[in-house]
Image (cartoon, helix red, strand yellow):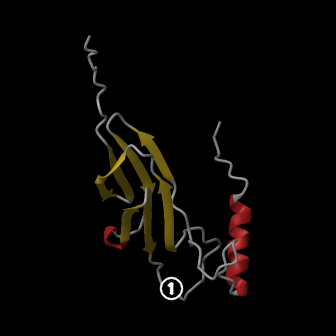
């Protein structure tokens, strides 16, 4: 038996993007003129004892084209995957690979330490490690009589 991942909204999202592109519409749902991401990389987020780890699948993106920054408790990952500029469309039956810019934002908990963030890319997988702040140990206060 083969397991197939079911994503009911992916076809509707793809259709909306194609219609927006065909009509030249770059507005977001809020009506602003800011272009939305062309594709969204899948991420895994896990919490470890001394850090938070975000793992993002970004195949085909050069590490120099990835920007990671932290501001006001928000971690932002953005970049761009260049498409192969092929004018020849002969032989293509379906094109599913995504190209263009991507943008992901993550709200970090208060325990995240902005000074302890590192990122590395290996074989199309970006791993961002966010260190946790050292916990203040409780202190017993003696009561004098």
Report x, y in % for residue 114: 33, 54
Residue at image position (28%, 20%) is 140
Report x, y in % for residue 134: 28, 38
Q: Looking at the image, can residue 32 be seen?
A: yes
The residue that label 1 is drawn on is 86
Q: Looking at the image, can residue 58 be seen?
A: no
- Foreground residue, 99 or 72? 72
Tell whether 112 sits left or right of 17.
left
Count up the numbered dots.
1
- Foreground residue, 57 or 74? 74
Residue furthest to the top = 145
- Foreground residue, 145 or 101? 145
Query: Quadrant of residue 26 in the image?
Result: bottom right
- Does 62 appear above or below 109? below
- Does 139 appear above or below 4? above
Report x, y in % for residue 138: 31, 26
Residue at image position (50%, 67%) is 103
Residue at image position (45%, 50%) is 108
Tell whether 66 sits left or right of 141.
right
Query: Quadrant of residue 70 in the image?
Result: bottom left
Q: Quadrant of the C terminus?
A: top left
Query: Quadrant of residue 20 in the image?
Result: bottom right
Q: Quadrant of the N terminus?
A: top right
Residue at image position (44%, 63%) is 76
Report x, y in % for residue 2: 63, 40
- Does 117 appear above or below 65? above
- Does 25 appear above or below 142? below
Q: Secondary structure under badge 1? A: loop
């Amino acid at each position: 038996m083969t397991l197939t991942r079911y994503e009911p909204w992916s076809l509707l999202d793809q259709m909306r993007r194609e219609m927006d592109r065909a009509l030249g519409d770059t507005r977001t749902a809020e009506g602003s003129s800011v272009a939305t991401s062309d594709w969204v990389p899948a991420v895994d987020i896990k919490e470890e004892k001394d850090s938070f780890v975000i793992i993002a699948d970004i195949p085909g993106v050069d590490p120099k084209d990835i920007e990671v920054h932290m501001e006001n408790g928000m971690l932002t990952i953005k970049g761009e995957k260049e498409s192969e500029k092929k004018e020849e469309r002969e032989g293509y039956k379906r094109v599913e690979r995504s190209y263009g810019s991507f943008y992901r934002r993550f709200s970090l908990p208060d325990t995240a330490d902005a000074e302890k963030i590192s990122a590395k890319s290996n074989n199309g997988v970006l791993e961002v490690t966010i260190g946790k702040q050292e916990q203040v140990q409780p202190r017993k206060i003696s009561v004098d009589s």
